[in-house]
Image: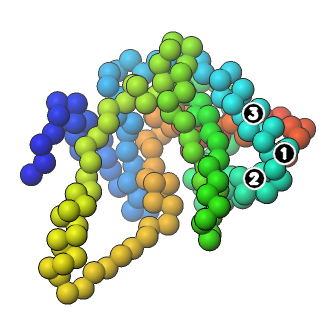
């Protein structure tokens, strides 16, 4: 049995009743806000400034742009993100996740991993990460795994494709996972808003 901190116990009290399965069999979760005050303030300008920096890198390294675009296209095709056509939500009740790519040359398959930055501060000086509880670690300790490998005759390993994107965020909290994007490394088209 795990020993939980008070914050982790509160997180579990939020997580258990608000986590459901949808009709396709995927989990749908609420974001575990620490309070009912989910006002983060406007961080759109921060997200746009960071995106312009990303576009500068696109102009310098064509392969970086192509790999990034491939990731964005895949998210759209798999319906892991959808474009927001009507931006009527108040800025205080949403959050824009700045993003950037991390390149790992030693990888044989995907060399670029896109990282979303929920620690970016908003106009109130708060980030999304600061407003959310951190849940407990659920995977076993490495020592326990090694012992199981030594005591069992067969070991199985699995890789769940795009594991974290298989979990959906409740519609009422999706506005806290906005990103901005535009096609073309030269910034010729308009910036659009998407929800993860």
| Residue depicted at 32% across the width and 25% down the height | 34
Task: Tell me the SS state at disc 3.
Answer: helix
Work out which residue is located at the far top of the displayed protein and give it: 124
- On the image, numbered disc 2 is attached to which residue? 64
User: Is residue 2 shown left or right of residue 184?
Assistant: left
User: Is residue 124 shown left or right of residue 140?
Assistant: right
- On the image, numbered disc 3 is attached to which residue? 53
- Disc count in the image? 3
| Residue depicted at 88% across the width and 41% down the height | 186
| Residue depicted at 72% across the width and 26% down the height | 49
> Callout 1: few (<14), some (14-19), or many (20+) C-alpha neighbours within 10 Å?
few
Of residues 53 and 186, the one nearer the viewer is 53
- Residue 26's mark? none
Work out which residue is located at the far left of the displayed protein and give it: 1
**Is residue 39 in view from this perspective?**
yes
Looking at the image, tell me whether mark 3 or mark 2 is earlier in sequence order: 3
Of residues 80 and 184, the one nearer the viewer is 184
Task: Tell me the SS state at disc 1.
Answer: helix
Q: Position of residue 48 (x, y in %)?
A: 71, 28
Distance Cα–Cα, label 1 vs label 2: 9 Å
Work out which residue is located at the far bottom of the displayed protein and give it: 153
Q: Position of residue 59 (x, y in %)?
A: 85, 44
Q: Quadrant of residue 96?
A: top right
Foreground mark, 3 or 1?
1
Mark 1 vs 2: CB contact within 8 A = yes
């Amino acid at each position: 049995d795990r020993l939980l901190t008070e914050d982790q116990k509160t997180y579990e009290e939020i997580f258990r009743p608000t986590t459901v399965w949808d009709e396709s069999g995927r989990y749908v979760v609420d974001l575990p806000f620490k309070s009912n005050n989910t006002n983060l303030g406007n961080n759109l300008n921060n997200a746009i400034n960071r995106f312009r920096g990303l576009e500068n890198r696109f102009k310098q390294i064509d392969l970086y742009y192509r790999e990034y675009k491939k990731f964005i296209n895949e998210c759209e095709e798999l319906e892991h993100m959808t474009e927001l056509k009507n931006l009527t939500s108040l800025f205080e009740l949403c959050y824009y996740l700045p993003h950037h790519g991390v390149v790992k040359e030693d990888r044989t398959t995907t060399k670029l991993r896109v990282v979303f930055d929920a620690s970016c501060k908003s106009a109130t000086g708060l980030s999304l990460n600061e407003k959310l509880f951190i849940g407990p670690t659920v995977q076993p300790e490495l020592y326990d795994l090694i012992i199981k490998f030594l005591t069992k005759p067969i070991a199985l390993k699995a890789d769940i494709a795009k594991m974290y994107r298989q979990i959906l965020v409740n519609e009422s909290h999706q506005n806290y996972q906005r990103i901005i994007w535009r096609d073309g490394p030269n910034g010729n088209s308009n910036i659009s808003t998407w929800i993860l």
